[in-house]
Image (cartoon, rainbow, N blue to C red):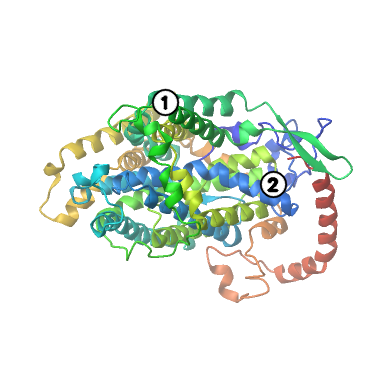
Amino acid sequence: MTPSSDRELNGLDNPSFVGEDGSHHYSLPNPAAQGPEKIGVKGRDNKLAYTITDVPPWYLCILLGIQHFLTAMGGLVAVPLILSRELCLQHDLLTQSHLISTIFFVSGICTLLQVLFGVRLPIIQGGTFAFLTPTLAMLSLPKWKCPAWTQNATLVNASSPEFIEVWQTRMREVQGAIVVASCFQIFVGFSGLIGFLIRFIGPLTIAPTITLVALPLFDSAGNDAGQHWGIAFMTIFFIVLFSQYLKDIPVPLPSYQRGKKCHFSPVYLFQIFPVLLGLSLSWLLCYVLTVTDVLPVDPAAYGYLARTDTRGDVLSRAPWFRIPYPGQWGVPTVSLAGIFGILAGMISSMLESMGDYYACARLSGAPPPPKHAISRGIGVEGIGCLLAGAWGTGNGTTSYSENVGALGITKVGSRMVIVAGACTMLLSGVFGKVGAMFASIPTPVIGGMFLVMFGIITAVGISNLQYTDMNSSRNIFIFGFSVFAGLTVPNWANKNSALLETGTIQLDQVIQVLLTTGMFVGGLLGFILDNTIPGTQEERGLLAWKHSHRGEAGNSQLISEVYDLPFGIGTKYCAVSWFRYLPACPKRLPGSKKMDELKAAGQESSDKASSERVSEIGADTRI
């Protein structure tokens, strides 16, 4: 998802590092990296405590790393919880907890790969709803619909070989589709093809595609929230209260500083953790209503699934330690229908990630990413999807714009903070009790969270229209028709699958999956109409779109420092002559070797100065 507003992108919400005297303890990032619009009136609000190449104190890395994990938690947990229903796992909470632990673990690995070898920006990787929509379409095929007995909790024996085979065959089918489709993303990224494709894709293609990622999920959100609308609305109330009404109110928390010892510093807690706080309070309310027997004890009664004891036993059954591994659900299987469906979600995911790269660069004090860094980032995301398919998360990976927005709140753009967050995700994936805890959240609480999250994703898709001329009847027609067709065609195809039969089973499945995937239908129509109906570049929004993602080039030395491969790869090691011709590798210009030698000679003095500056800032930093 791309951030929904300039306010979020620019980080103009309240900073988290505030001194007792109201002063801000920041260091100013490179002006060339910020662009002309960043300097001036807004300059004071955009100062960073730590830029992308800085290394904060270890305790700050750990605390902010945990915060990034908690910020991404909502999306990470939501994906396996939604998918579990179509995998016939709604009554097997222990396996749901294993899926949550697996997606935590794989997201940690993918984040480390992206930060160290990918685009090299401080950006979190995790599961995506773009893959969820085609996956649900694939699992809705008659072949993969859950047997009736799996819907009855009294008939389900989670440890029986028959039940295990039912859900694992479906998971292996999803895994195979993701593994094969990820090869396409790897090729598009490392071949540099993404730069060619983006020429034909503008806001009128992206807007209906992202909008239709979330709109078809209204049924899932409604079913979960409908288990007890009172609890669901209470969850919504808390999330909206914290994220919208109380976000500007600081909470005094104890902190420590050399010279001042223990004292209280303001922290914008509601702005940083609105989803976590909302879920926790609603969960606590459900617990109180359970122990007082206000909620019904009859499983057939309305509101029974709001009780905490219906899911509480998963905590005691889950192991303390469990290391996810590739092929833990068996050898993946492959079908054409699944591959084509996942490809539609993968293209949408790549477009979203590109927008996140530019936003993340602005907020972390880095110059806009060059083409080779973008290509490498998309390629590494493809590798992440390959790993997710091998491990069996039931999903792929993409960049998380929620965490991009968190950079603007914390004013810390250091890569080391995201490395700490990735390590937190790895540890959470190994501790089985963590996944079990999230799997035990009452159903209506989850439904309330879904209503908020899916609404935001829909609005983010529509917000891409800000670049276009919406007074143009051409643009109104393209967007309106694409979205409405993206809802109508899948609905008809689901109800009339027999009319789509061609006599070839494999072809029937491909047609069924593609036509029941709303984001594919709407995105394809938007792409065709936007590139065939006459319209000016300005009318189509391409000029404003390119300008918003262009930024300032920055000096070559800073770009090299931020985006070159780590550990001297391509400069000290593997510095072969043909290296610079690879699309995903930095171009070494004449004189670059001499520049590297000069940089190495001055590295010691630079490190000393940087260390002194970091120590000075770290002493005055407030959390």
Front label number (2 vs 1)? 2
Q: Report x, y in % for residue 35.
A: 68, 42
Residue at 57 percent across and 39 percent down: it is 548
Label 1: few (<14), some (14–19) or many (≥20) C-alpha neighbours in 10 Å = few
Q: What residue does disc 2 label?
A: 365
Residue at figure coordinates x 66%, y 26% from the top left: 248
* Residue closest to the eye, 47 or 455: 455
The part of the image, by quadrant, that contains residue 82 is top left
* Residue drawn at (62%, 56%) of the image: 419
* For residue 590, side relative to residue 183 (left or right): right
Q: Which residue was labeled with disc 1?
A: 472
Of the residues shown, which amino acid type is indicated by label 2? Answer: Gly
Which numbered disc flags the more N-terminal residue, 2 or 1? 2
Residue toward you, 258 or 37: 258
Whether tag 2 and tag 1 are in contact, CB under 8 A, the answer is no
State the SS at label 1. Answer: loop
Q: Secondary structure at mark 2?
A: loop
